[in-house]
Image (tube, coloured by chain):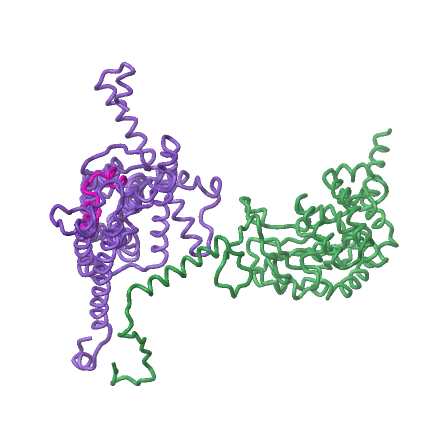
Chain colours: A purple, B green
Amino acid sequence: MADALTQLGFASWLSVLIASIIKVTLILVGGSVGMMFLTWYERRSISYMQDRRGPNRVGPQGLLQPISEAIKTMTKEDATPRDADKIVHFLAPVVMLGATVLSFAVIPWGRMFPVDLNAAVLFVIATGGLHSIGMMMAGWGSNNKFALLGGMRGVAQLISYEIPQVMAIIPVVLMTGSMSLQKIVEAQNDFAGLGWYVFSPVGLLGFALFFTASLAEGERTPFDIPEADSEIIAGYMTEYSGMKFAVFYLSNYMSNLAVCFITATLYLGGGNGPGVDALGGIAGGLLSLIYFLLKSFALFFVMVLIRATVPRLRVDQLMSFAWKFLLPLVLVNILSASFWVALLRWDQQWPKLTEWFGAPSTADATNWGRLAIAIVLTLLINAGAVALIMRLTNRNVQKHLYTTDEELALGLS
Amino acid sequence: MTLSHLATEDVFVVERNDADFRAGQGMTKGLGIVFRKFRKALFGKPNSDRADTEGQFNVQYPEERLAMPEAYRNMPILLYDDATGHELCTSCFQCERICPPQVIHITQAKDPATGKPVPAAAKFVLEYDTCMSCGYCAEVCPFDAIKMDHDFELSTANHPELDVDYNRLLRPVSYYETIAPTMWSDVKEQAMKKLQNNIKRRPGDIGRDHGQKIKGGAPVAAAATPAAGAAPAAAAKPRGPVAAIGKNMPEDKTAKLLAIRAANAAKRGGGAADAAPVAQAAPVVEAVADAPAAVSAAPTGPVAAIGQNMSEDKRAKLEAIRAAKRAERGE
């Protein structure tokens, strides 16, 4: 865009500035409108899950409900506690929203990339990590015990779940050989646009693990421990009202939206789908955008479904789930991803493979023999690991489920 | 596992089979149930039976309404006869006596000529704001004059408006018949018989001089002749109700009622005989809109007096006084 402006006769610095401003505006507007739609979408769908109808009065099908609520929150009083650390209290929502908006810089809208970073995956993870700072600022700056508890819980949860989340992306990076989101999307364009990573055993497990860890990162039920309203009012948001609360809300939903977008990009092929390449040009771009949004909102529907079904975890359950269940599986998944890549790509190291199964399928033609072996091998590894770890977890659970007579006699139960 | 110190029959143990491989089947099942509920609520039929556990339960209230049970009771209303315009209330004070929050206030009508009490109420005030909708008044009324209404949308910003006077309490019998047909048919005969007896003891317009009941031509003429009062009420029925409904209800409601009645008439199998009066009724309803004009345009005999809350002999007296004054002034 900057080049086009330079050709129109603008100075080069000016054209870069104008192009950046336009991009930033588009991203911010897209993110906020997406968030507004998301609140409506969540409320409507969860209403139907509970045999209700949800907001359907303001505008057609209640679509303008988020706007009326935005106006409501903006006109509310913005109170700051007397004993709060005023600067930190004020900055906390700004940091939260800033971290969320930053991650939107690299998210591809279908095949349209605002910025194609060569380390976009790292960038997304890093901006996601900034959330814990905002949370801690809000919890500490409010000078309220519930806020502090919520902030502490939030930081503990985010730090624990960042590890499985990050490590669940490693298989994708291995299989693509790049951290650029654009390259990742391009790598999933085989088989007429249906070569999504989720259809391979490695990608399937990675998708499940990444999505679960992302639920915890986005503080969605059943991992909404930082803002568990039945225990600690609203967690770190307890002392916020009016516009600041709205900013927290915006940042929460935008990060959920970002999680859906990134999951769709990493595992569900982004804007890839049948017919995108055939159309090409602007029409293909629009079709890819539609595919991308459909995938993202389907993922968000799953989030809502989980919210409507599963009750909140305890803190210890949360931690043991992260460290004893997700992390081992993620490690195993990295192993099987290495096998996958080794079988499909690396053959200078292992000339025998080329002798037996032909050349690797790096470029145009797919080598079906190698692909079949890779699928079988990774499927065996992953399924075996899942079965083993679930059995171990079950045994652990069983051990603590019942009280024995001896324990009862000793009063240990 | 045993819990030896407890009586075994008091303990319910959830059996978890150790041999079963548990890999999130329970959670998947739960998600499946929630998704099925989602699907049924979004695409399925709305819930019709209270025993149903799936489907849309909500009724979109201002647009859709559930049918009210006949015995539903909200606030008391007073009935008057469609044909004659006579109120059923005789001011026997039974309701005033039984009313637990004591919100009913009645003044008995007096014969202006003799000063003796007449079986009719001169004033009737009911405080809707304190009424507790117990329905005792309707239960106790020996003349079936006070009944419980189904209209529950009574909220107002004007508090004094909730002290409802006679004019606003009155509803035609035909209105009550539409909201509670079987309950009215049970008592109709005796109520009408008692009303005819009471009408005989009411001089002049006493007992029908509240509200603006009689409108739209034919029923007025019927009411004006004393013979019509003694005639069976059913004779005037087909036309009377329609005019009467229009008085107490907004126009759209009237139209709805008419439609309902037309459907009922068709159901009853009366065919053309019953449906015809309903068809005739349409212009009558239109006439209701400019009813005050219609009343003042036909000032024949007693009819004119009714609208203006004035009895015949009162008017005669007034005329006499005016004539005397004119004579005094020497005209």
Q: Position of residue B51 (x, y in %)?
A: 52, 66
Q: Where is residue B291 in the image (x, y as percent from the top left)?
A: 75, 40
Q: In this view, does B331 lie to the left or right of B102?
A: right
Q: Nearer the viewer, residue A372 or B299?
A: A372
Q: In this view, does B188 lie above or below B170?
A: below
Which residues, given as a range, are shown in magenta? A158-186
- Answer with the quarter of the image where residue A246 lies: top left
Q: Nearer the viewer, residue A367 or A70?
A: A367
- Answer with the quarter of the image where residue B192 lies: bottom right
User: Farthest residue toward the front?
Assistant: A355
Q: In this view, does A9 lie to the left or right of B266?
A: left
Task: Work out whether residue A138 can be spotted.
Answer: no
Q: Position of residue A170 (x, y in %)?
A: 18, 48
Q: In which quarter of the image is the C terminus of chain B?
A: top right
Q: For the image shown, how many numbered marks are present on the structure?
A: 0
- Say whether residue A170 is magenta: yes
Task: Work out whether residue B228 can be spotted.
Answer: yes
User: Residue drawn at (38%, 36%), measured in percent from left and top?
Assistant: A278
- Answer with the quarter of the image where residue B139 lies: bottom right
Q: In which quarter of the image is the N terminus of chain B?
A: bottom left
User: Farthest residue toward the left?
Assistant: A349
Q: Where is residue B206 in the image (x, y as percent from the top left)?
A: 78, 52
Q: In this view, does A114 lie above or below B23?
A: above
User: Residue drawn at (74%, 40%), measured in percent from left and top?
Assistant: B286
